[in-house]
Amino acid sequence: MAERTIEVSVGRNPEMGVDGFPAASPMRPFDVPEPRLDTEEMLINIGPQHPATHGVLRLICELDGETVMSVTPDIGYLHSSFEKLGEYRTWNQIVPLTDRMDYLAPLIYNCAYVMAVEKLMGIEVTERCKVVRVICMELDRIFGHLLWLGTTAIDVGAFTPFLYAFQQRERIYTLHEALTGARITTSATRVGGMMADLPEGWVNELLDFLNTFPDTLHEIDSLLTRNQIHIGRTQGVGAIGAADAINYGLTGPNLRAAGVDYDVRKDRPYYDYETYDFDVPIGEHGDCYDRYLCRMEEMRQSVQILHQAIARLPGGPINVQDPNISLPSKTECMSDMESMIHHFKLITDGIPAPEGDCYMAIEGSKGELGMYVVAEEGSTKPVRWRIRPPSFVNLSTIAKLAEGHLVSDLIMINASLDIVLGEIDR
Amino acid sequence: MTERPLSGLDAVERGPLPSDPSAPAAPAPVEGQSDHPSVAALASRFGPAVQGHRLMAGDQTVVWIAPEKSLEILTWLKDDPAQQYDMMSDVTGVDYGSGRPIEVVYQMFSTVHKRALRLRCRLPLEALEIDSVAGLWHSANWLEREVYDLFGVTFKGHPDLRRILMPFDYAEGHPLRKDFPLRGRFSRAEQTRRALAQDVERFYGSQELAHGGPPQQVPARTEPEAEG
């Protein structure tokens, strides 16, 4: 594994004063003596139908005045039993289920699932497919982070970044549509390759996006990073230490914001990520502000990775040239007897898997996304298909993060974890 | 009179099918050496409690352990300086069906040594019990609740073992078991009847309602004193 260099500092801005406020700002917080009120503990229910919970999440809060004493998340409102459904479907039929889990970064889920199946079956995909999948995953990392950025900014009262972020997301939607025919439910991957190769001119459209997107990101950055209201709402809110963050199972930007140097792309590399030149931003305070900085930097790094991936995009076939894995083309199917038989066998039976299990962890936009597939000898359907959901484990920390904070901070902490309920409830 | 056909509730009350010794075994450990440093250390320290190991999917090491010793083994794997599996990525279950044991699977990763290890624990259907590791890794808390919810495995010593994805009063059993039909154990009519009979208040359990104490009295409003 290549030695890691972290060159990007996402620490505090040097122009900030020691109290965490811009040194030159005329606005200063002033202390108001807290009025003495007789308060009683109170049980407040937030959600499940509430815009600030980012999905059908229900939080049962025990409050003392405005201070959160304890939070009990209640999940399961969106439970669709995807894992059970998967046991009734062949390997390729499961792909459409995967992008319905994290509809904010669907291509990452498509890729992660087929990577686990390919590893279980010992299929080595083509070089072109690897690079195309890296492009898909990094593009959707930006896609997922942009939604997080826009909605989180709204939660602390900043409306403009939401519009900027969604304008850029719209461009990625268009790229999705050109690549897969769908804007959200992409279902772009197949075992052994992709549904289709990149359409003509798609790379140029992607380059056009990559060349203009950093300017918008910079604009959003200038609206939030040194914004006193944003800093006041995020710095020191929902902080967690490095050892606790690991023990609580936090992954992704949430873990790295706490100062833990763990990125699946670097520590358990897949698809030649060790040969791409990119940095992993590490925070130090583990609070909402560091999570914000980590995600902002990750988007910039993803742009770098995308540029490198486009530069090295090799030619050649995108699917594995094995008639027992990849479907033949329509022309072959209609003119060649053997291709038609392969087509028939693949559609009716599916691809047989060897006995065993496989856990494939990749760096999703929300954290370590694990796909665990279990098969018996020759089974064309999984015995068990399990998703290690990053949001699910991240959300389980909210009780610890929010304890002692105000209710309004609870909303910010919930937003900063970047959850998606489709994947938590599955 | 014909015998009454089995209803969905009977299937719940009958419980899981007993283990079937004639069913072919699930993937078994193989003999031989392993390159993974934890495997030899585990075997030499715990002896027969480590039931074997196998290399899966090219480079993933799986170790089968005895459920009685699982807490001891996992504590050692977390605390021993040569192991230090400080991250419990995933806890899940696997049901192979036809009466074979349900397996509990632990995916661990050491951020210190950059090493992954998978442990599997076979639980016969008559004794679906294993020690909870939520005290060692907080991340296991919700993951074990999910296994309890969907497979019916009881985690002894878990601080808060409740259903998590299914409703707390779900009466049809544990959905990810192989003997659970895809559309549920109850008929559509029964499911509809139960859905319509729900009480809105039931979403607050009695425990939750006790949190806030008795209903609060709004104090009489007093006029602020005029400042002079």
Image (spheres, coloured by chain):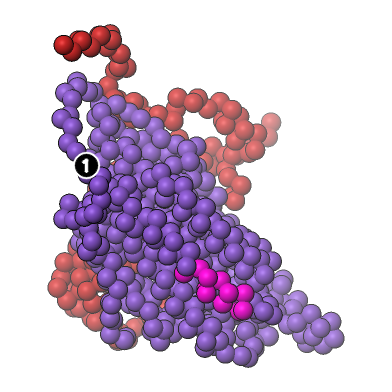
Chain colours: A purple, B red
- Give the quarter of the figure containing the N terminus of chain A: bottom left
Q: Can I make out residue A134 in this image?
A: yes
Residue B178 locus on image (x, y percent): 53, 56
Which residue is pictured at 22% across the width and 44% down the height?
A: A28
Q: Provide the residue span drawn in magenta.
A: A203-214
Q: Can I make out residue B128 in this image?
A: no
Chain bearing tag 1 is A
Q: Is residue A46 magenta?
A: no
Residue type, label 1: Pro
Residue carrying label 1: A29
Which residue is pictured at 33% across the width and 52% down the height?
A: A227
Q: How many marks?
A: 1
Residue nearest the observer in this picture, A165 or A369: A165
Asked if residue A84 lies left or right of residue A199, the reply is left
Which residue is pictured at 30% across the width and 50% down the height?
A: A228
Q: Would you say the magenta stretch is mainly helix, strand or loop?
A: helix
Residue A299 locus on image (x, y percent): 43, 68
Which residue is pictured at 42% across the width and 71% down the height?
A: A300
Residue nearest the observer in this picture, A135 or B168: A135
